[in-house]
Every structure is written in structure tokens, then in C-alpha cells.
Image (cartoon, rainbow, N blue to C red):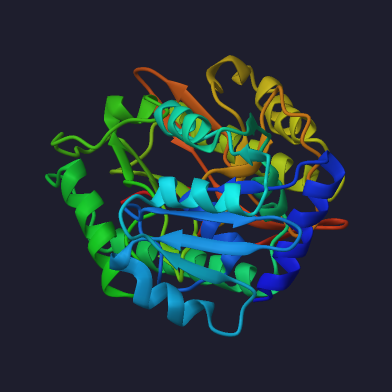
Amino acid sequence: MNAQARLSSLRRRLALEEVPAILVMGVSNMRYVTGFENVFDEGINAACLVTPEIARFYTDRRYSEAAERAAEGTPWAVRVQRESLYIELCDELTNDSIGEIALEPEVPYGRFKFISEQFGGSVKVVGHWVEELRQVKESHEIERIAAAASLADRAFDHILGHIKPGMTERDVALELEFFMRRNGSDGMPFPPIVASGPNSAKPHATVTDRVIATGDALKMDFGARVHGYCSDMTRTVFIGEASERQREVYAAVLAANEAGLEAVRAGVVGAEVHEAARSALAERGLAELFTHGLGHGVGLDVHELPTLNPRSDDSIRAGSVVTVEPGVYEPGVAGVRIEDLVVVEEHGYRLLSHAPKTLIEI
């Protein structure tokens, strides 16, 4: 990956906004702008300072060896905390005669207040500058996301051979996670959703000890993480023979999934893609049971820009990776969601999720 190109893009944004410096502190954003491998975890204490001339990575001694190794041959200079990372960082800002800095909106208020008071200069919260850069994936990023999607496909095929009445939702969730971890997933990008019977009609159900029974719909939403990049997929299967109404709901969601996919292409606004799927459900009288946005970007995080929902004015860009995940949630019948992961191209999309979408009865 070319860390210099990412730095140059961020520096152009600084120039456009007439801001002399930005502190990047979100873990995924730091990983993106530095390009460092094998440095970051969710507990890291770190910050990136970017100005037109400076690229510094501040961290503590727990990460210093890995950071210094990762920074070799890159524009990044590593600063290792002696006593207080943010005090030392602010002292360097003063020594460099930097009078204004930008912070990301996700910075906790306590940290924002501390930096503002310690720095003494002007501090402003700016938009999602790095997240906007992250929307368009480089080729190696798409390869990693595709590998994570392929692993999720394999996990689905694996779990089909294990599901049976009498298992609990927790049993299924653990088997999915064990399979993906055993086969190369770097942890889970999010806790798998495994929801059966009445729980399937909850769009974002948590895993329970409910015993899966004949007649249930079983909704499984899960993903893998490969070399830091995520995948996201949902499939719904039926335990025993699906009822006529369950078949109707499944067919409607599959049609909505296909309509959403056909609407995906570069330049389309997120709300338009959502509406294409919603309209397919409206034709079948089920639009009111579709209660969430159609999709979202995926990359270093499982939820990124752009958004695909009724209010989204995000223009989808070629090279983005997004989900298309319509769902219908009918209490007493079933909750069905079918989610695919795709790369956006100029005139359409390329599918990354290849697990079957035909109705499956187990």
C-alpha cells in the first residue's frame, strides 16, 4: 500500500479547508493513514499528527517496537511516550508553532477538553475526512475484503451441515465463529447474529439460548476479518418445511435483494438504491415490514461510508464496497434478511458474497 498517496490526499483536504494540522485518533483511521500492519488493536494509545510537512505517529512503549518496524521506509516518524502522550504531543505542537488543529468528531469529550486546554491554540472538530478517503478501496483492500467474504461463504456451507433441531442459537453462533477463526479470521468484525423462530422477526436480535425447532426461520448475520478487512453477509434458512407464508416472505426479500443489486452503480445516491429494494417489497405489500436501511460501506470497519438508507445523499463511488441487505420482519411468521457484499463499479457491481440464496430447508 502507498502511505504517501494517502497522506497526500489528507494534506489536500487540509489545504482545501485551510487547516494547518489534524490529529487522527480513530483506530481504523490511524491504520489507514499510516498503512501500518501488525500495530493496532482496540486498546492502543496512539495518535497521528498530519500537517503539510509532518507525519508523526505517537504511541506508548507497548507498541513502540512494532510501530518503528512498520514505519521503516514510510514518511512516518514515530514518537514514543515518556510520561503523558497528549501532553508531549501538545508540547510538540507548540514547539512547531502550530496554532490550530482539527480533531475527528469521534474524539471523546474528555479527551477533546484535555487537548484543548493543554494545547492552548484553536481546536476545531471537522467532518469525517479520513472516512471519506476510505470509501474508495485500493486493489489490495478489495482483495482482503473478498478473502473475508469467501471465508464467510465457507462458514455458511459448513454450518448447513451442523444445524439441526435441538441446537441452540448460541451453539450455531459459536460454531460459525470457531470455523472462521480456525480458518484464518482475525477475530470477529462483529458478534454473529443467530436468531430463530420469533427472534428472527427482530431485525438486530442478540444470540440467546433458545432451542431451534422445526418450523423456525433461522436468520444468520455474520462476517470474517482478514488482514484487518471485514466482510458482512446474512442468510436465512428454514428448519423443516417452510410454510406458504414463509415462502412468500422469502421470495419477496429475494426480489428486493435483486432489485437493490441492480440499482447499484457508481454515481447513484444511496437513497435511490434503498428505494429500489423498498419498491420491490411495496409491490408485494411488505414495505412497512422493512424497517432499516438497505446497506452500508464495509472495509476496515464493518460499518463505513457510504450509507444506503432513505435519507442518504451519499453518492456511491466506484471502488466502494457496500452491503445490500433488505429484510422483512413479520411477527408470528418469520424474519427474513438476505445480505450480499459487492464492489461498486462504473456500470454496476461485482458480487463478493457467493453463498446460495435459494430457499433452503434443513
Q: How many marks?
A: 0
Residue 82 sits in quarter: bottom left
Q: Give coordinates of residue 265: x percent, y percent.
A: 82, 50
Residue 184 sits in quarter: bottom left
Answer above or below: position of 140 versus 351.
below
Asked whether, in this view, residue 169 is left or right of residue 205, the answer is: left
Q: Is residue 353 visible?
A: no
In this view, the residue in front, 334 or 19, is 19
Q: Give coordinates of residue 305: x percent, y percent.
A: 65, 43
Q: Is residue 278 visible?
A: yes
In this view, the residue in front, 108 or 80, is 80
Q: Give coordinates of residue 106: x percent, y percent.
A: 52, 35
Q: What residue is drawn where x is 43% and y is 32%?
A: 114
Q: What residue is drawn where x is 70% and y is 23%?
A: 310
In this view, the residue in front, 26 or 219, is 26
Answer above or below: position of 122 versus 4.
above
Answer above or below: position of 155 versus 73.
above
Q: Give coordinates of residue 26: x percent, y percent.
A: 50, 47
Asked whether, in this view, residue 52 is left or right of residue 309, the answer is: right
The N terminus appears in which quarter of the rendering? bottom right
